[in-house]
Structures are given as C-alpha cells and as structure tokens.
C-alpha cells in the first residue's frame, strides 16, 4: 500500500525502530509522494525548502510538493492517514513565505 511504503520510508530514513538507510527511505518517500500521499509530499517539500534530508535547497521543488500536500488534504484525496493540524499550518506558512520571497528562520 502507499501508506505502508510511506511509513517504511519514514522509518528507514530516520532510523525509527529499524537500521537507518537514508537513501532507501528517501526513495520510498518520493514514490509515496508521487502516488498522492500528502504527508510524504509535505516531507519532501519541507526538506527541499530547508535543504535537508539529503535534498538540495530548491524552492521551486519545495513549492510544488507543499502545494500538492495541501491540495490532496483539501480535496480529501490523500492516499495516507492525512496530516496533523500543525503540519498543515507549517505547510501553509512555508508556501506563503515562498510566494512572498521571504524565508523562515532555520
């Protein structure tokens, strides 16, 4: 399932209860995001915004994935468990800052 892939990607990338494997974890998160898993889109967008998770800082890429995460949640088409309110609000803040040309502090 897409949700299972996203969960495994998160576990592997961050070493949550399993041996850490950042490359495989990031790949699974990317596949899940491509299959409309909103939280995976949010993770890719956030880390593209910050230049973390092994991703280069790329605001165009960040804007794409953050927008997609919100769109999936708002349309009720998420292939996962949804997103926490705090994550949705963070997503909205980052998008607003990207659109305004300002950057959040680290």
Image (cartoon, rainbow, N blue to C red):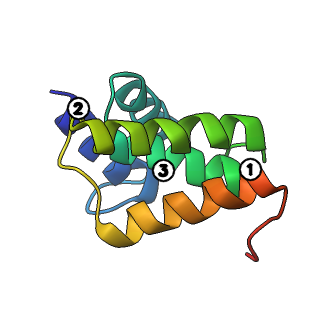
* Callout 2 crowding tier (Cα within 10 Å): few <14, some 14–19, many ≥20: some
Q: Which mark is residue 43?
A: 3
Please report the residue visible at 76 percent of the width from the left and 77 percent of the height from the top. 105
- Residue 81 or residue 15, whichever sits in front: 81
Please report the residue visible at 17 percent of the width from the left and 48 percent of the height from the top. 81
In terms of secondary structure, where does tag 1 sit?
Answer: helix
Please report the residue visible at 74 percent of the width from the left and 36 percent of the height from the top. 60
Q: Which residue appears farthest toward the right when viewing the image?
A: 101
Q: Which of the two labelled residues, at mark 2 and mark 3, occupies the earlier sequence position?
A: 3
Give the percent coordinates (x, y) of residue 57.
Answer: 78, 47
* Callout 3 crowding tier (Cα within 10 Å): few <14, some 14–19, many ≥20: many
Q: Quadrant of residue 19?
A: bottom left
Q: Which mark is residue 99?
A: 1
- Residue 49 or residue 77, whichever sits in front: 77
Q: Is residue 28 above or below residue 8?
A: above
Give the percent coordinates (x, y) of residue 94.
Answer: 63, 60
Q: Which of the two labelled residues, at mark 1 and mark 3, occupies the earlier sequence position?
A: 3
Q: How many marks?
A: 3
Foreground disc of the pair 2, 3: 2
Cα–Cα span, label 2 and label 1: 24 Å
Foreground disc of the pair 1, 3: 1
Q: Quadrant of the N terminus?
A: top left
List the residue tagged with mark 2.
77
Q: Is residue 9 left or right of residue 27?
A: left
Q: Are marks 2 and 1 in contact (CB under 8 Å)?
A: no
Any part of residue 41 in sight: yes
């Amino acid at each position: 399932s897409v949700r299972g892939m996203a969960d495994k990607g998160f576990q592997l990338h961050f070493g949550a209860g399993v041996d850490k494997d950042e490359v495989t974890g990031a790949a699974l998160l990317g596949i899940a995001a491509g299959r409309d898993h909103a939280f995976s889109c949010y993770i890719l967008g956030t880390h593209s915004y910050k230049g973390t998770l092994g991703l280069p800082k790329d605001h165009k890429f960040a804007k794409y994935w953050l927008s997609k995460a919100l769109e999936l949640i708002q349309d009720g088409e998420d292939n996962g468990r949804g997103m926490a309110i705090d994550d949705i609000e963070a997503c909205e803040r980052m998008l607003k800052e990207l659109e305004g040309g300002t950057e959040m502090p680290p």
